[in-house]
Image: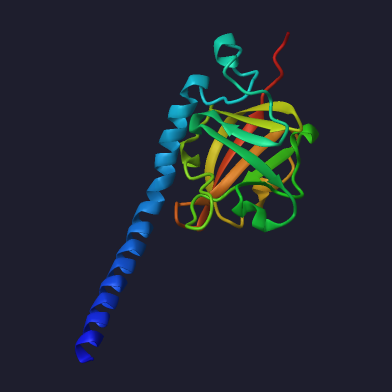
Amino acid sequence: MVKERKIRLKHFNWLLVFIILAINLYVLVSPLLPQIDLWRRKQEAAAVAGLPYKTNLDSSSKKDDMRAEIPSDNRLVIPKLALDEHIYTGSSPYLVNKGVWARPNTSTPPKDSNTVLVGHRFTYGGPATFYSLDKVAVGDKLVLYWQGKEYDYTVTSTKVVAPTAIEVEEPTKQPQLTVYTCTPIWSAKDRLVVVAKLDEPSQP
């Protein structure tokens, strides 16, 4: 009886050790998964230069034949990151847990002014949508597909601000796209903000 109890206790201890090791491995490996995913996405998107839909940014017929038609849903595409994400709209702040969330009470592309999009940098329980947003630099392109129309933006600035810097969401006189997330990774200490201006429509 005592021997059986010792054996069961020994098995339980080994099970406990295995669970602790598995949890530690998950905590260590999870932050690396978005980097691996970025590498995979870039490999897949290389043939279309990170532009998955037909676009004004690249009229190459060979590549355009490989691209999908303009999406019917609202989407954000960041070619440099091979990022292609649906944009959630609504007043619930929990929508950010799904991916890219269009901040309510800010503008939309057809209305000009300041369109503001937010997303998580990294969480253990949700999408790390903007994990690599720090790789975006001045001059890079951002593309919004909104209500079946394409809006092309060029990044004009990147900056880190305090969470209290609500002015990043204020209306602007010129059409602008503001994308922000938490920084540094694994922290909500500050906000990493990417600002882009709407490109002038190309002349026929």
Q: Which of 85 and 112 is in front in this view?
A: 85
- Residue visible at 52% across and 44% down in the picture: 130
For residue 28, side relative to residue 140 (left or right): left
Q: In which quarter of the image is residue 67?
A: top right
For residue 157, side relative to residue 35 (left or right): right
Q: Tell me the quadrant of the picture where the C terminus can be found.
A: top right
For residue 157, side relative to residue 186 (left or right): right
In the image, residue 1 sits, relative to residue 172, either above or below, namely below
Q: Tell me the quadrant of the picture where the N terminus can be found.
A: bottom left
Q: Nearer the viewer, residue 175 or 151?
A: 151
How is colour applied across the structure in the image? rainbow
Q: Looking at the picture, how far across and down is residue 138, in whole percent?
A: 52, 30
Q: Which residue lies furthest to the right in this view?
A: 111
Q: Looking at the picture, how far across and down is residue 78, in whole percent?
A: 56, 32
- Residue visible at 29% across and 67% down in the picture: 18
Q: Residue furthest front?
A: 1
Q: Nearer the viewer, residue 123 or 17?
A: 17
For residue 157, side relative to residue 171 (left or right): left
In the image, residue 77 sits, relative to residue 68, either above or below, namely below
Q: Which of 98 and 9 is in front in this view?
A: 9
